[in-house]
Image (cartoon, grey):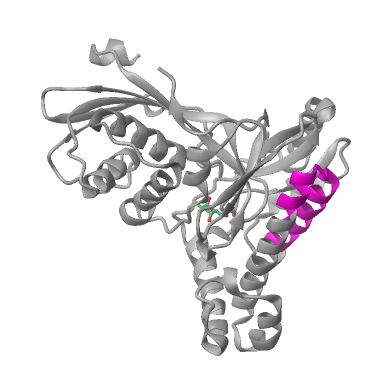
């Protein structure tokens, strides 16, 4: 398609979406997360131009946008904010941005909490860097793409989504320490499958709820820090701190902090269990994490709670929870491989019968992070 549209042979890159097994709303608190890159991805084809323009074609929207390569891009609440945000951040890092044609295509379902925007940022960054002859270590590239969200798009997200899109590994989950960006890979056993169930309730991190939850949890952290210092982030807080000073917090702040503090503990425990191949324990921790996300963090919604409940007694289930930024989107289910097809069909049938909404249910596997494919 790129060749036909732009009459130029492109370099082609891919960056995956992600599902998070456990560790929700802990990344911006410098805590732990355990995501997996999935086999839904965004592709970018890029070739140089000689007319001083940046022309971006988005196949999914059947839309083309043109920019002046020498001008400072401005956000416009449009899909092109993501690629142009990358251009802006890379220019700020001292790269001279050339004129180019970029074609984009993706199958990460939009607004479903599977990080379609992180995949778009990461794939664009790789494509543009290939033209300017630049490269960064994975964690640095992820940080640059996070800055696209924080500084250009205006979404106050953490590092998880960009990090896993860059650094994911086939058949593995990645335990990330969001403080120093060190990580460990834990193999997902060959007889275990990821079943991702889309509630079809749209998710967005640009909206107010994500921001409010983050602010509430940070307010609790400030109270603890005011007492004993050395707690700039909830990563540094303990349940003991909550017991001592929780009564000074707004009730909602207390609950948000309780979720984040316990979620960090669960995430580290889940990664150790996964490394030992103790899937029963991983599943138990996922179930606990969902309850905490729903009840304490109030980050779920009726449909996602229902999707988790409906999965709970299905044959083959290891663990189920709402994944990603929350308030809609997808649940992630770890399921024994030989049961996965029947599990997906029955879950879809049950959910449709209860809600009247036909969900999309995907049987997925852990994939490699972003790379060049052509
Ligand atoms: C969204 C954000 F982009 C992540 O940084 C993370 O905070 C997640 O929500 C919640 O765990 O995906």
Residue 120, by quadrant, is top left
User: Is 32 rendered above or below residue 345?
Assistant: below
- The x, y position of residue 208, in whole percent, is 47, 62
Q: Quadrant of the N terminus?
A: top left
Residue sitting at 48 percent across and 64 percent down? 211
In depth, the one of 117 and 23 nearer the eye is: 23
Say left or right for 282 vs 9: right
Residue 134, by quadrant, is top left
Say left or right for 247 vs 71: right
User: Is 260 rendered above or below residue 306?
Assistant: below
- The x, y position of residue 198, in whole percent, is 64, 39
Q: State yes or no: residue 178 in magenta.
A: no
Q: Quadrant of the C terminus?
A: top left
Q: How many marks?
A: 0
Prevailing secondary structure class for the magenta stretch in the rendered image: helix
- The x, y position of residue 38, in whole percent, is 59, 33
Residue sitting at 68 percent across and 38 percent down? 197
Say left or right for 257 vs 103: right
Residue sitting at 17 percent across and 46 percent down? 72
- The x, y position of residue 229, in whole percent, is 52, 84
User: Is 243 rendered above or below residue 142?
Assistant: below
Q: State yes or no: residue 290 in magenta.
A: yes
Image: magenta residue range: 270-294
């Amino acid at each position: 398609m790129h060749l036909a549209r732009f009459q130029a042979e492109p370099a082609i890159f891919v960056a995956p979406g992600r599902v998070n097994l456990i560790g929700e709303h802990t990344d911006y608190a410098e805590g732990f997360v355990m995501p997996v890159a999935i086999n839904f991805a965004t592709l970018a084809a890029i070739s140089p131009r000689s007319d001083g323009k940046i022309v971006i074609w988005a196949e999914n929207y059947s839309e083309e946008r043109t920019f002046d390569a020498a001008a400072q891009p401005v956000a416009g609440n449009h899909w092109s904010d993501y690629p142009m945000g990358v251009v802006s951040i890379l220019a700020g890092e001292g790269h001279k941005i050339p004129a180019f044609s970029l074609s984009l295509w993706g199958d990460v379902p939009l607004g479903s909490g599977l990080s379609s925007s992180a995949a778009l940022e990461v794939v664009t960054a790789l494509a543009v860097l290939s033209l300017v002859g630049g490269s960064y270590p994975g964690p640095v590239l992820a940080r640059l793409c996070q800055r696209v969200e924080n500084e250009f798009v205006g979404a106050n997200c953490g590092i998880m989504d960009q990090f896993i899109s860059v650094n994911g590994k086939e058949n593995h989950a990645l335990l990330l320490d969001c403080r120093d960006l060190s990580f460990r890979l834990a193999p997902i056993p060959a007889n275990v499958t990821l079943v991702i169930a889309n509630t079809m309730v749209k998710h967005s991190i640009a909206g107010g709820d994500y921001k409010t939850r983050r602010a509430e949890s940070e307010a609790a952290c400030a109270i603890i820090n005011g007492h004993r210092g050395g707690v700039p982030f909830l990563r540094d807080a303990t349940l003991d701190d909550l017991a001592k000073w929780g009564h000074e917090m707004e009730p909602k702040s207390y609950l948000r902090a309780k979720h984040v503090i316990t979620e960090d503990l669960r995430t580290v425990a889940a990664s150790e269990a996964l490394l030992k191949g103790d899937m029963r324990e991983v599943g138990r921790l996922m179930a606990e994490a969902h309850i905490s996300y729903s009840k304490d963090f109030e980050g779920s919604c009726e449909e996602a709670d229902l999707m988790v409940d409906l999965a709970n007694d299905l044959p083959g289930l290891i663990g189920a929870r709402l994944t990603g930024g929350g308030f809609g989107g997808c649940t992630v289910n770890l399921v024994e491989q030989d049961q996965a097809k029947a599990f997906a069909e029955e879950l879809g049938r049950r959910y449709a019968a209860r809600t009247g909404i036909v969900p999309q249910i995907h049987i997925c596997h852990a994939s490699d992070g972003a790379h060049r494919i052509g």
